[in-house]
Amino acid sequence: MTQERPEPTRRALLAGLAGLALPAVPGARALAAGPASVATRPIPASGERIPVIGMGTSRTFNVGDDPGLRDARTEVLRVFFEAGGGMIDSSPMYGSSEAVIGYGLERLGMQETLFSATKVWIRSQAEGVEQMAESRRLWGLPRFDLMQIHNLVSWERHLETLRRDKAEGRARYIGITTSHGRRHRELEEIMAREPLDFVQLSYNVLDREVERRLLPLAAERGIAVIVNRPFRRGALFERIGDAPLPGWAAEVDCENWAQILLKFILSHPAVTCAIPATRQVAHMRENMGAQIGRMPDESLRKRMAAAVEAL
């Protein structure tokens, strides 16, 4: 049986913080009370509102056929939905992740709050049609809420297909993604001239290049923004190490560094949803707490960035 790899970085961080005498904050109480008070943002193209914290599945849900690991990921999904989660984002690039999502959804039952998002990731337009049909089969869905073109691969060909799928009801929204800063200029050009519902890009407290052009352009063009790699795939927790939680964390109802890092992203007015990925139930609960309580203003955002930069 495949063994679960530990996540020592955040666990070590939490152990270091466990002894701190932190005041109770409203976030914990609100999350315990259920999902009614979670923050949502509108999709500009329609006005439909979605929760600001979604879930990525790159690496974390690629567990193959191992029944124990599949059941563990189903528990992560359960906690996500119980906390009011909506968007789940995946891709054929992520190995068995789509099949594992489908496994979990079958066992949990279809969730009313689910906002299904995946991608097409292949050069051929014809094979892209087949790939998207396979994704629907794996998830157990007749259509996706959002279909995206992964990392701009053959984007012109696939965008033609996506527009047709949207018109014919196989996708409700369409978009384009990148997780590479070197593609930002190309993405900017596409955003400026193509009618897109969503873009997905990387953004976090240290990687802020998108604040200069892409995020303002998304706001101007009415394009929803999904943020991937909010923790730099865990590297931000390595940087933070055992640093104590700043005193100002309580001002925005943050109980841990994960929530600080996520609220920095979510407090940007152009951001619609962030999609942290995790394989741990405890980490999912931490992440979902970021959609509860107060958000930082511009002054506190600067303090957040300076605090992490100084570590």
Image: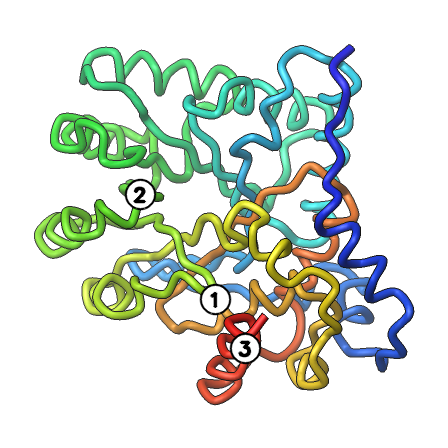
Disc nearer the start of the sequence (3/1): 1
Which quarter of the figure is the C terminus placed in?
Answer: bottom right
Mark 1 Cα within 10 Å, few/some/many (few <14, many 20+)?
many
Kindly identify which numbered label has been placed on residue 178: 2
Provide the secondary structure element on which disc 2 rests.
loop
Q: CA distance from mark 3 to mark 1?
A: 8 Å
Q: Residue at x 56, y 30 (%)?
A: 59
Residue 144, above or below 290: above
Q: Residue at x 31, y 24 (%)?
A: 121
Given the image, on which type of amino acid does mark 2 rest? Thr
Q: CA distance from mark 2 to mark 3?
A: 25 Å
Residue 217, above or below 124: below
Which residue position holds label 3? 304
Disc nearer the start of the sequence (2/3): 2
Kindly identify which numbered label has been placed on residue 205: 1
Apparent side of residue 191 relative to residue 282 in the rendered image (left or right): left
Mark 2 Cα within 10 Å, few/some/many (few <14, many 20+)?
many
Disc nearer the start of the sequence (1/2): 2
- List x then y, in percent, for residue 85: 62, 50
